[in-house]
Amino acid sequence: MKQKRVPIELGEALRLIMARAKPGKTEVVPLTEAYGRYLAEDLIADHPVPWFDRVAMDGFALLSDDTRLATFDLPVQLKVVGSVGAGHLPQKKVSPGQAVRIMTGAAVPKGADAVVMLEATTQQETENGVFIQVKRPVKPGENIARKGEDTPQGAVLASRGRRISAGEMAMLATFGYHSVKVFTQPVVGIYVTGSELLSVEAPLEPGKIRNSNSYMLESQIRQLGAIPRFYGIIKDDPELCTRVVAKALEEVDYLIVTGGAADGDYDCIPYVCQSLQADVLFDKVAMRPGSVTTVAQIGSKWIFGLSGNPSACFVGFELFTRPVLRCALGATAHPHLPRSKAVLVHDIPNNKRITRLMRGLLEVRGSRVLASTVGVDKSGVASSLVQANGLLIIPGTGQPLHAGEEIEVMWLERPDEGHFYV
Amino acid sequence: MKQKRVPIELGEALRLIMARAKPGKTEVVPLTEAYGRYLAEDLIADHPVPWFDRVAMDGFALLSDDTRLATFDLPVQLKVVGSVGAGHLPQKKVSPGQAVRIMTGAAVPKGADAVVMLEATTQQETENGVFIQVKRPVKPGENIARKGEDTPQGAVLASRGRRISAGEMAMLATFGYHSVKVFTQPVVGIYVTGSELLSVEAPLEPGKIRNSNSYMLESQIRQLGAIPRFYGIIKDDPELCTRVVAKALEEVDYLIVTGGAADGDYDCIPYVCQSLQADVLFDKVAMRPGSVTTVAQIGSKWIFGLSGNPSACFVGFELFTRPVLRCALGATAHPHLPRSKAVLVHDIPNNKRITRLMRGLLEVRGSRVLASTVGVDKSGVASSLVQANGLLIIPGTGQPLHAGEEIEVMWLERPDEGHFYV
C-alpha cells in the first residue's frame, strides 16, 4: 500500500538540498573559452597596474620644476629632444630645459616627472631645433599614472566561484591568464516521461501533446552555464523508466526526469526511487506549483523528479535543480535565484493555505521595483512563462494581498535583462 | 592642418546612430539551436491549448449530474467501467451510473463532464465489478481544462524581435516549431591597435602592456548574441591600419577598431576614415569616458573607432555598438541598455561640466534600487569593470550629488543577474 506523502516546507527542502550540494571538478581552459564559465582560482594581479610610470595624455614629458615660474605672458621655453610613441621605450634622459614629445600609454622618460598636454603648449621650429612654450606651471606627476596606482601587485580582482563576464575577461588578459582554471560544466541529463508526449516534429494526435519540457529545461541549464543532454521521451512504464534512468546515471551526475512524479498508477518516479534504492530527500513540497517534486540521491548522483506540467517543471528546476548546479559550478555564494521585495501593482486574491509562486513581471519604475502577475497563473498554463521574468511569493496566509503592498519576489534569469525587456 | 573636433551631445550621437541602424538578415535554424537567438517571426499558437478537453487531476471521469445529491452520509455509488492513462484515448462513452479511472493529461471520455479527485472517493471491489463512492456533488467541468482555455488558437505568444529564452523554447516546442526563423547573428570584427600591445601569452616587456580589449569586446559581443571575430593586434601605423581595415570590411559588416581614435601623431582612425572616404557620423562625444569615439559608415558597413583605454572602450561599445547590433539582431524595440533611476548611497563630488558615466554597483534593497560607485573611476582603471553592473549618469552640472538623491542609471548585462551577484 502506498504511503501518503508528507509535504515539507520550501525552506526545509532547500536546506536539505544545500546540505548535500558540492562544488564539482575543475579544469583549465584557454582564455578564449572562459567567458560565462566560473572561476576555480582567484584572479590575482601578478604585476602592478600600470606596471611602469605611464603617460596618461598625449603631450610633452618634462621636469615640472622647469615650469614653476611659467605664466601666460612669460612662457617657459623647452627644447624638444625626442619623441616616444606608446610601446616604444624612451632612449634619453630628459634634462632641465628639455622636453620629449610623448603619446598616451608610453613610459615616462627618465628625468621627467610630469607631462603637459599637447593643447596647453605652442610649438616653434628654429634653426636650433623644435621648441615648446609652456604657459603655466605643470604640477609634479601631472598626467602621469604612477606604477601600481590603479591596481597594486597581488590584489585579488575576482574570487574563485565568480562567473566570468566582460570585465573579468579584460582582467584575465591583462594579467596574462592565457589559460584559466574554471569549474567543469556539469552535464545534466533529461528524460521526459509520459505516454501522451509526441516529438516536436510529430503532427498532433488525439489525446496527445508535444514534448516541450526538454527544450525548456535545456535552456534553463544552458543559462546557468551547464550542459544539457536530452535522453528522450519515455512512455509511462515504471520498469522501463527504471532501466533507462539507471543507465543514464552511469553517464551523468545530474538527471532530471519530468512527469510521473505523482502517485498515479502510471507514475514512474516513486517506483524508480524505490527500485534503485535512492535516498529520497523529499517527494512533496508545501508549495504550488511544483508540489509533487522529488529530489533524491544515489550515491553522489542526483535525480530530480519534476512535474510534467511545464510551469511546475520550470519552477521546480529554478528552485531545486538550479542551486545544486550553481554549487557544482562553484558559485557557492549565490546558489539561489536573486530575491528582493517589490511593490504590488494590483490586488491578488488569496484564500490558499499553501505558499504559491506566481509567475510575474518585475519592472523598475523610477527607482522602485514593481511586481504584477502575468497571464493566467494556473500551473498548467505555460504561455505565461514567455512574459514572466520573476516569481511572486504569495504566502499561504489565506489573506488577499493589496496593491501597494511590498511582497517577496524572485528574479528569473534570461539571456538578456528580461525584467526590463518584457 | 588638423581640424579641431567638435564634440556632440550623447543624445544626438545616439540619434545619428539609430537613424541608420537596421535589422539584419534572417535564417531558419533547428529548434535545438534557437535558444538565445532573436525571433524573426511571430510565435503563433497554431492550435488551441489544451487542444482537447483535458483531465487536470488524477481521478474518475463521471457525469456531474449523477453526483448532484451525494452527501457524506449518503454517497453516490458509480460503476468503474474502464481506465485511461495520459496519451491513451478513452474507448467507451461514460453513461449515467458509470465512472472511468483517469489520469492527469488524458482526454475526457465522451459522456463525462467532470472529474472527481482520486482522494475524494472510496473504492469497493464486488463480484459485480469495481465501484466508487462519491461523497459530495461534483461540479460540471470540475478538474477539466477545456479546449482552448489556456491559449486560444491564433494567439501571438511572442513577437518578432524577441530574444528566445526558456519560456519561448517551451512554446515553440508546444506549437511544433521544429525549426524557427531567427535573425542571423552578425559577425563583428575586432582590431586592436597600439604598438604597446602584447599578446596575452607574451611576457611583459618594458613600456608594453597586454591586449585585453579584444577579450572584453568578444564577451560583450557574445552577451548580445552576435559573433566576434578577432583579427589581431596592429601597430600604430595609419597606412597599415587602413589596409587591414579595408580588407576586414570585405568580410564583416561591423568592425571595431580600438585605440588610435584620438588626434595623436600615431592615431590611425582619423587617417583610416579619410583614406577610405568613410561617412563619419561623429568623432567626439561630450561625455567621459569614451569622448574620443568615432562611428562611421562605408556604404552599409559600420566602423566603430573605440578608445584603446579598456574602460572607455567598454563604455563606447555599450553605448554605441550595442544598439546597432541589437537592431541588426532584430531587437528594434529595446536597442539601448536598460535604464532606470536609483537612489545614491553616497555623495559624489562633481565639478565637471561634461556628462560622466561612472561605473557603479546597482543593488535592490527592499524594493528600492540603490546605486554606488565602484573602485577608482578614472577611465584608465579597468579593474572596476569586474565589480560594475551599471553605469551612473553624472550630469555635467558642476554640482555635487548627494546621498539619497535619485539619479539616472544604466544596467549592464552579464551572463548572470549581475546586479545581485556582485
Image (tube, coloured by chain):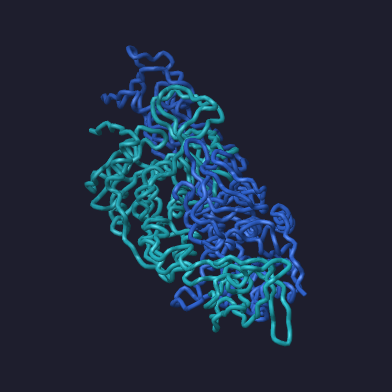
Chain colours: A cyan, B blue
Residue under the image location 49 percent in, 37 percent down:
A359
Seen from this angle, which residue lies furthest bottom?
A127
> From where the camera sits, is residue B369 visible?
yes
Residue B410 lies, in percent from the top left, at 59, 49
Nearest the viewer among B192 and B116 is: B192
The N terminus of chain B sits in image quarter? bottom right
Nearest the viewer among B319 and A5 is: B319
Residue A35 lies, in percent from the top left, at 46, 62
Residue under the image location 77 percent in, 69 percent down:
B3
Q: Horizontal placement of A349 versus A274: left or right?
A: right
Residue under the image location 42 percent in, 22 percent down:
A398
Q: Is residue A204 above or below residue A49?
A: above
Q: Horizontal placement of B215 versus B81: left or right?
A: right
Q: Is residue B207 above or below residue B7?
A: below
Residue B268 lies, in percent from the top left, at 66, 74
Q: Quadrant of residue B204?
A: bottom left
Q: Horizontal placement of A249 versus B368: left or right?
A: left
